[in-house]
Structures are given as C-alpha cells and as structure tokens.
C-alpha cells in the first residue's frame, strides 16, 4: 500500500472514530462535521480508485 492510500485509510478510520465518539457524547454539531469529513474522504477515495469497502464495517456499524 502506498503512502497516499495509507494516509487516506488512516484519515477515514480517524473520522469514523471521531464520529462515533461525537455520537456517544451527543454532540450534533461535531457529528455533522465528522460526517462531512467522511463524505469528502470517500469522494477522494472514489476519484483515485481506492477500495474502502473493506475494513470499516465494524466501525460503521458502531457509529
């Protein structure tokens, strides 16, 4: 995995984790911010052909 893909996956992981934490704390504004960050990262992944279908299932279900 190259540096770009590694960084993208780490940023997605961090954003999903932050979204989950914001939901746990009931912070609606932070939830919106993190959801927007995730949307941007998913769009970047799609534009560059990075597969993000695997590896985030557990986090997404928890979020």
Image (tube, rainbow, N blue to C red):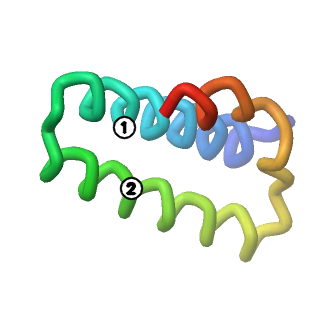
Residue shown at 85% from the left, 53% from the top = 51
Crowding at label 2, few (<14), some or many (≥20) Cα neighbours within 10 Å? some
Label 1: state its secondary structure: helix
Q: Position of residue 5 (x, y in %)?
A: 73, 45
Residue 29 in the figure: left or right of residue 19: left
Q: Give coordinates of residue 40: x percent, y percent.
A: 48, 66
- CB of mark 2 within 8 Å of CB of mark 1? yes
Q: Is residue 38 left or right of residue 28?
A: right
Q: x and y percent of residue 11 in the render?
A: 51, 39
Question: Where does the N terminus fall, quadrant-wise?
Answer: top right
Could you say which is closer to the camera, residue 24 or residue 36? 24
Spatial CA distance of label 2 from label 1 is 7 Å
Which corner quadrant of the image does residue 48 belong to? Answer: bottom right
Mark 1 Cα-neighbour bin, 10 Å: few <14, some 14–19, many ≥20: many
Residue found 60% across the figure and 36% down from its top: 60
Who is closer to the viewer here, 57 or 14?
A: 57
Q: Residue 4's mark?
A: none
Residue 32 location (% of width, % of height): 26, 57
29 left or right of 3?
left
Instruction: Find disc 2 in the rendering and name its residue.
Output: 35
Of labels 2 and 1, earlier in sequence is 1
Quadrant hosting residue 12: top right
The quarter of the picture where residue 36 lies is bottom left
Q: Is residue 27 above or below residue 35?
A: above
The number of numbered discs placed on residues in the rendered structure image is 2
- Is residue 60 depicted above or below 42 in this figure? above
The residue furthest bottom is 47
The residue sitting at 81% across, 57% down in the picture is 50
The image shows residue 11, relative to residue 58, as above or below, that is: below
Label 2 sits on a secondary structure element that is: helix
| Residue for badge 1 | 19
């Amino acid at each position: 995995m190259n540096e770009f893909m590694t960084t993208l996956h780490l940023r997605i992981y961090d954003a999903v984790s932050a979204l989950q934490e914001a939901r746990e704390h009931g912070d609606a504004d932070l939830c919106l911010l993190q959801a927007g960050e995730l949307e941007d990262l998913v769009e970047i992944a799609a534009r560059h052909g990075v597969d993000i279908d695997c590896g985030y299932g557990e986090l997404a279900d928890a979020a």
